[in-house]
Image (tube, helix red, strand yellow):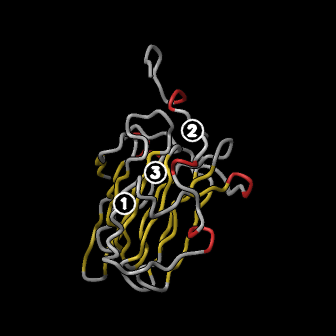
Amino acid sequence: MQLEPTTLPGVFILTPDRFGDHRGFFSESYSRRRMEGLGIHIEFVQDNHSLSGAVGTLRGLHFQTPPHAQDKLVRCGRGALLDVAVDIRHGSPTFGTSVAVELTAENGRQLLVPKGFAHGFVTRAPDTEIVYKCSDYYAPDCDAALRWDDPALGIDWGLEGAEPVLSEKDAKAPLLSDLPAVFPWSDWMQPGETL
């Protein structure tokens, strides 16, 4: 398992080793022991799997608020997608900053999106499947979203002027400026640090 930092502290790209031959390949996509060996101590309790039929299907930006905030480990089971994480920790030096990583069935990469970050993706191939682990169960009362096209975020979804396929919920999600401070940066600060 290879661990690669991104421009957002705490958000990592994980690439499991693959062992292939004429039949295909084998890969250990998750191992708690290997993750802990990399310094990642997260207990995942739920796996989610979704299929998006059309290219340009955009889901996000989603997150759950405390007390049911979720860490997510995201991978592409089939097809291709652009996976995005946005720092929504109020007061963070990287608040409102995003990182985007291409995840495909071929490259096997995974994105670790910790609590305090919104998550979304757009599909780049038909019939794309996304598979991800969550560190807390789905909690409808804590389910929240952030507007995918908020100009303050400046995310390049690679849509090249095309309109994405959206849910009604995602089309009406609030802007970053309207987001309450549900993830205060002080919760992540080390002793002795100041804002």
Name which of mark 2 and mark 3 comes first in the sequence. 3
* Mark seen at residue 155: 1
Type of residue at label 1? Answer: Ile
Q: Of circles 2 and 3, which is in front?
A: 2
Percent across and percent down for residue 93 are: 38, 34
**Distance Cα–Cα, label 2 vs label 1:** 21 Å
Please say if 20 is above or below 120. Answer: below
- Is the C-beta separation of discs 3 and 1 under 8 Å? no
Percent across and percent down for residue 118 are: 50, 53
Type of residue at label 2? Answer: Phe
* Mark seen at residue 183: 2
Type of residue at label 3? Answer: Val
- Is the C-beta separation of discs 2 and 1 under 8 Å? no
Disc 1 element:
loop
**Distance Cα–Cα, label 3 vs label 1:** 16 Å
What residue is rendered at 42% in x and 65% in y? 75
Q: Of circles 2 and 1, which is in front?
A: 1
Name which of mark 2 and mark 1 comes first in the sequence. 1
Viewer-proximal residue, 155 or 12?
155
Q: Label 2: few (<14), some or many (≥20) within 10 Å?
A: many
Q: Label 1: few (<14), some or many (≥20) within 10 Å?
A: some
* Circle 3 residue: 113
Percent across and percent down for residue 144 are: 63, 55
Disc 2 element:
loop
Percent across and percent down for residue 50 are: 55, 74
Viewer-proximal residue, 31 or 15?
15
Please say if 109 is above or below 176. Answer: below
What residue is rendered at 41% in x and 86% in y? 126
